Image: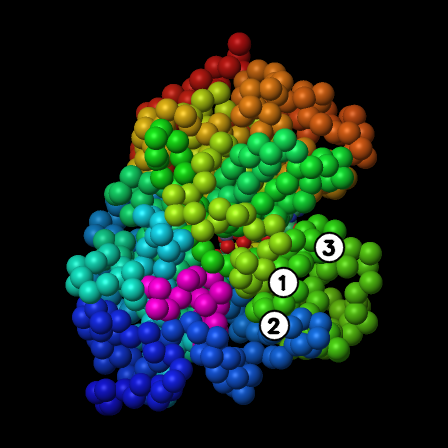
Amino acid sequence: MKMSPAIFPPSGIGDARPANQAVLDWVDEIAKLTEPENIFWCDGSDRENEFLIGESLKENLLSKLNQKKVPRSYLHRSDPNDVARVEQFTFVCTPTKEEAGPTNNWSEPGETYTKLRGLLKGAMRGRTLFVIPYIMGPPDSPLTKVGFEITDSKYVVLNMRIMTRMGEIAVKRLGNDPNAEWNRGVHSLLDINPERRFICHFPQDNAIISVGSGYGGNVLLSKKCLALRIGSYLARKQGWLAEHMLILGVESPEGKKHYVAAAFPSACGKTNFAMLIPPDHFKGWKVTTVGDDIAWMQVRDGRLYAINPENGYFGVVPGTSYKSNPNAMRSIAHDTLYTNVALTDDGDVWWEGKDPDGSGPAHAIDWRGNDWTPNSKEKAAHPNSRFTTPMRNNPAIDSDVEKGGGVPISAIIFGGRRGDTVPLVHEAFDWAHGVYLGATMASETTAAATGAVGKVRHDPMAMLPFCGYNIGDYFQHWLDIGKRLTNPPLIFNVNWFRKGVTGQFLWPGFGENMRVLKWIIDRCEQTGGALKSPIGWLPSPHDLDLAELDIDHKCVAEILGIDHEEWQKEIAGHKEFFDSLGGVVPEELLEQSEQLAARFKE
Ligand code: GTP
Ligand code: SPV
Ligand code: MN
């Protein structure tokens, strides 16, 4: 066994080695275990990036795209068995099962470390071990966290450079204190075998070990693993919130600005909402993006302030077009890594929904690398194909995205993908009722995780796969945060996905969601009208600005309304969900459930 792997490359490129002995010792320990050929300390520089792209092209890990059509952009095809998050193989390894709670897979930390060490033994033989220093959050934010990810995947390094602030900035922030707080992430591809794929979190050690996958949320350990699972655990201990939320700014023609955070489950519209372009009717209104997936929020002066810990977007490609999301299209027109989309004969990228007029290519290479034509049964792009793009590519980026103190949140929105029952928008009566709306939200499953698609399941606060501790304690934490807020955000629920009898969406969605956002802002400004209903405040059709929208009145009444019979089933579903959690749900939320049922009887 090689005791001291060579530093690679020898000089000039890539060396952000920290002086902090704790990091050096940890890298040494993992190197002894995994036996890599080389160690590469990443610094995130342009030169390093070019070098790694060059190597990746040689190894066919990336394909070069037509640089005139998509400058400095590349395509990666993952293993067909490795295309999404794997919730069944994701574990929260707290000392006791109770701490992980009823919604997480738990495994005993000692045994799990032993099992993972066994899998990692010699796993990097003949490979390079990359060390990625990174921070999550703007450089001058008190919420910002330091992480180090060890990986044997160049794809991970290239993605982490876009998704995080990487290199020297992290080494500096960490400093020399051997007891400083930093996250230890270890990732190895092994042989990309679904049977040896485990994503394990040890929140008490601020540590993550991920093996057997090379895809997205399984391996970019900064994202779901650190910023949400470990993040939520730290947030509870430290008194803040780590949430699966976009953050957007909305500015009126008079220059009055509000910020809104919204939690929708995976592939349910966060990136699209965060980049919304208001329809022509809303002349002078501007929507800007702070973040598209994750919000870290703290209480200050009785208000909630949010930062986006990320530096880029790892977004769903299919359905993205100049019609549905022009800001995303402009963002991904250059300097973008594409994963699992189709490659056209002229070296461009293509996917289902790119041309809403139906003018797709006559031939392409599909995401698996096979020939594809419009007559093919298979999709050209995988439904969970993704783009990785720097947030600075977004023409609508908010000017306060680097503000360390965060942006003040006026409204929190929960939302799911529901074909029936749940109206287009409703507002909670108060904070505790809002927490209840979040805790009881349900949504159809999507291709973002492996398993069935289109199955309605409860996904509290869109955090079911991401809450790193007991969900009952998480609900209580939300209630407790509310008690510290003298100026709390108003809480809403939205549903862009209600369907009519023929199965078509009743609401046009995308840019037209501005009409709902405008009502939400009106409510924050105390100028918007609403009707009291058993489930919360509902806009009546004239409370929403529907001018110049081609939608018929019956349709509007249907999406804004509630059906009492459907809601009896819904309430029974809430109770069943709470019961399934086995007694961890706070009393205050059980009371909310009773009150909801009682309001229907009034
Ligand atoms: P993650 O990155 O997995 O967390 O997803 P996300 O919540 O950011 O979802 P995203 O905005 O990428 O949208 C997912 C899918 O939903 C895409 O195919 C979109 O085209 C579609 N979508 C987004 N917004 C709307 C909407 O308002 N109406 C309809 N019908 N579809 C939408
Ligand atoms: C999600 O699934 O919510 C994502 C994609 O944002 S991934 O990073 O793969 O988790
Ligand atoms: Mn997400």
Report if the beta carbon of the residue with label 1 is closer than 8 angstroms to ligand 1. Answer: no
Write down the residue under mark 2: 73
Residue 151 visible at all: no
Quadrant where the image shows the N terminus: bottom left
Magenta stretch in the rendered image = 154-170
Q: Is residue 156 magenta?
A: yes
- Cα separation between marks 1 and 3: 11 Å
Q: Give, as a three-letter code, the residue at label 2.
A: Ser
Which circle's residue, 2 or 1, is located before the other in the chain? Answer: 2
* Residue 191 versus residue 210 in the image, above or below: below
User: How many other residues sit within 10 Å of disc 3, few (<14), some (14-19) or many (≥20)?
Assistant: some
Q: Is residue 487 magenta?
A: no
x then y, percent, for residue 302 = 35, 29
As helix, strand or loop, the secondary structure at mark 2 comes to loop
* Residue under numbered circle 3: 322
Along the viewing direction, whichever of 126 and 301 lies nearer the viewer:
301
Tag 2 near tag 1, CB within 8 Å: yes
State the residue in front, 225 or 579. 225
Q: x, y (%) of residue 346?
A: 75, 77
